[in-house]
Amino acid sequence: MRTRKLRLAIALFTLLAGGWWSAPAARAASGPRFRADSGPTFIVTVGSAFALSAPSPDAPPVFSVFQNQALAIIGRGADGVWLRLEVRGGVGWLPAQYGTVQGSLADVPVTTAGPESPATPVIGPPAPAPSRPAEPTAAGQPVWFTLAVKSVYGRSGPSLTSALAASLFRGQTYRVRGRLADNSWLSIDYAGAPEVWVLPAYGTVAGNLDGVPVLLPPAMAPVVMTPAPPAPGALAVADLIRVGSRAREIYQRGLQLGNDPHVFSRIGDCSSAAPDFLGAFDNPQAYRLGGPYADLRATISNFAGSFARQSPAAVAGFSAAAVLDPDWADPRLCLAGESPVACEYRLARPSLAFISLGTNSTWESAAGYETDLRTIIQDSIDRGIVPILSTKADNLEGDDHMNVIVARLAAEYDIPVWQFALAARGLPDQGLGADRYHLTWGLQVFDDPQNLKFGWQWRNVTGLQALDAVWRAVR
């Protein structure tokens, strides 16, 4: 498995080669995003980079900078290779070759400073202790967001396709200035950036969001769904699920290794996490099958307890790289040095596993995504766990190459693949909401034609069909 240090080295190399992320042309034309008050200024020319806590490529990051951003130069290394820069919210170091200098460096002091601290939040109380949830406040009172994961990018809008706006780090607390109506995204006060949005699943919220203004940028206006949902059963199960010839062999070997025939796991992001994904099937009052889906009850009975169980490897925001990285493992459940995938497999000892990743992997190259997915597949097979690969409904990468990779790897390894993209893209708006990656929500009632037009409903019933098809094939 690639180490996190290697990933950082690769990212730095890419930046040196010209940057992996390009700012929109409109931003470039508008000039620097921030301007220094006085003295020499550093204009960032690479797409984006981390300002580091010390003049060394191995130093921890403290904040992000982006193309055309202007930062005040407050220090420099004796050899001129590194510059110490200041922006509202933090102080950090960047290689001089990442931009251009406006003004003279003659009066800039040569600095041998100690490690810088991460960017300071705008305002906010101390972060609450992880073991003690913050007390809610009354509506109208300030609401605070504290990051719980190691680090994440804040976005310039409420979408994973929006430009990167800031780097946020574990333990930082920010005031919440706005939200989407469904609370799926929060806008936070962040010094140095006019708009920073973050998924609330990345942290904890202290306060009552009911009193926070609802912000809805024009680009996020609700999508009007077309009135022609596909009829129930329009797609045959064989069109959606290919089991592959190796599934039974892997499954039977897994039973010999002690895997549980009544347990399945899920590896993925928010579209794979309980309770939204399949969780209703552990509660007979939360769903209604009927129609062509009545024969799925035996599968529900066999895997009872797995549907609503939380997996440490299926978490909002997870990418293919994150599920392999011990830094993203839940320390309450996982062992030191254990990745989220390894942790889930150790805890659950499943016989089958859904693997559905890609929405949060758009920052990875196609080769990097494929390498990570291969690692997960091979680890599953080595443990005797049948991987059920899934395509995704969104196309955030633009050319659908992640779904192509999924289908190709399923064929190469001769393992199950669930073509969820095929099911979802026959729905109104492809089963996607206004942000083009979250699924639309419907009640888990599958015998009502009026309720057969939502992304989540189709994901759950076709996911259950995939589980059923694989389970029946491997026994």
Image (cartoon, rainbow, N blue to C red):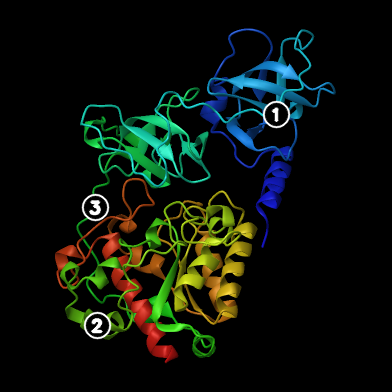
**Viewport quadrant of the C terminus:** bottom left
State the image coordinates of residue 456 (x, y, percent, origin top left).
29, 61
Callout 2, which amino acid? Arg
Which one is in front, 70 or 26? Answer: 70
| Number of callouts | 3
Q: Which residue is mark 2?
A: 297
Contact (CB < 8 A) between labels 3 and 2? Answer: no
Callout 1, which amino acid? Leu
Image quadrant assignment for residue 118:
top right
Helix, strand or loop at disc 2?
A: helix
Question: Which callout, 3 or 1, points at the residue further toward the start of the chain?
Answer: 1
Q: CA distance from mark 1 to mark 2?
A: 59 Å
**Viewport quadrant of the N terminus:** bottom right
**Residue at coordinates 32% horizontally, 71% vertically from top-left?**
307
Answer few, some or many: residues within 10 Å of disc 2's Cα (few below 14, many 20 plus, some between 14 and 19).
Answer: some
Q: Is residue 257 visible?
A: yes
Image quadrant assignment for residue 222:
top left
- Residue 94 numbered tag: 1
| 400 on left or right of 218 | right
Q: Which residue is mark 3?
A: 225
Q: Is residue 47 visible?
A: no
Which one is in front, 44 or 59? Answer: 59
Depth-wise, is mark 3 or mark 2 nearer the camera?
2
